[in-house]
Amino acid sequence: MRISVAPKPVHCRCPVPSKWRAEVERVLLTDAQIARRVQTIAREIERDYHGREMVVVALLNGTVLFLADLIRHLSLPLRLDFMGVSSYGSGTTSGELVFTKELQLDVCRRDVLLVDDILDTGTTLSRVLPKLRALQPRRIKVCVLLDKPARRVAKVAADYVGFEIPDVFVVGYGLDYAEKYRNLPFVGVLKPAMYKL
Ligand code: IMP
Ligand code: MG
């Protein structure tokens, strides 16, 4: 069950930093907005887990920034592992899903927190969740930074959602287009010209 309602980004007047102005149309979420929300989610997770040990399973590569910020606010005993999932689609659409790294830790009878960057069509999580469930964890909760409910195809929902966003292609704070823009400290809307070349 979702613990709190994910806020929708309010219209952000923050200008795109000049270095990114040619490629990014507008800032959707500032680094300050993200930082506040990540802290709130961490508090919700802490409350829900009551100090129980958990295994955090993060999907590579989009979660790196979100994950680093989230877990430093979790005062719980936790172990961290990664699954590599790559979608060999072209442009902004998902293609065939390929697992590029398997889990190393044993999650049998453990509490798992699965972390992803964005829940879009739901295809990724609908492939990853059965794979994790087959390892017989005690329970799995799903935490995503962003949720684009308008694009959902697979029946999958997250327990913790940072922000609910409209149907726009975003980059930054870990999210990429063709492996670029992950290092932006904010989440911005990519100019369509960048992927309609
Ligand atoms: P899904 O399988 O359609 O739910 O999409 C999940 C994956 O698609 C994410 O982990 C991202 O890698 C990618 N993705 C979906 N929407 C966006 C976006 O707006 N920007 C960057 N990546 C996205
Ligand atoms: Mg991804």
Image (tube, rainbow, N blue to C red):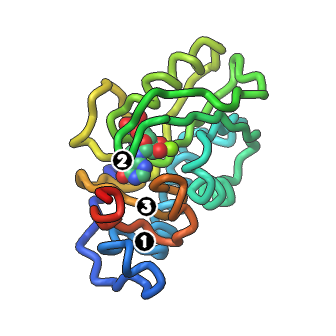
- Residue placed most toward the observer, 68 or 177: 177
Left or right, 194 with respect to 112, comes to left
User: In which quadrant of the rendered image does the N terminus lie?
Assistant: top left
Q: Looking at numbered disc 1 in the image, what kind of residue is underneath it?
A: Gln
Q: Earlier in the sequence, mark 3 or mark 1?
A: 1
- Residue at label 3? 171
- Residue at label 2? 92
- Residue placed most toward the observer, 65 or 181: 181
User: In which quadrant of the rendered image does the C terminus lie?
Assistant: bottom left
Q: Label 1: few (<14), some or many (≥20) within 10 Å?
A: some
- Residue at label 1? 33
Q: In the displayed orientation, state which residue is furthest to the front.
A: 197
Query: Which residue is painted at 35% across and 63% down in the image?
Result: 194
Q: Label 2: few (<14), some or many (≥20) within 10 Å?
A: few
Q: Looking at numbered disc 2 in the image, what kind of residue is underneath it?
A: Thr
Q: Quadrant of residue 159?
A: top left
Q: Nearer the viewer's eye, disc 3 or disc 2?
A: 2
Badge 3 residue CB within 8 Å of ligand 1: yes
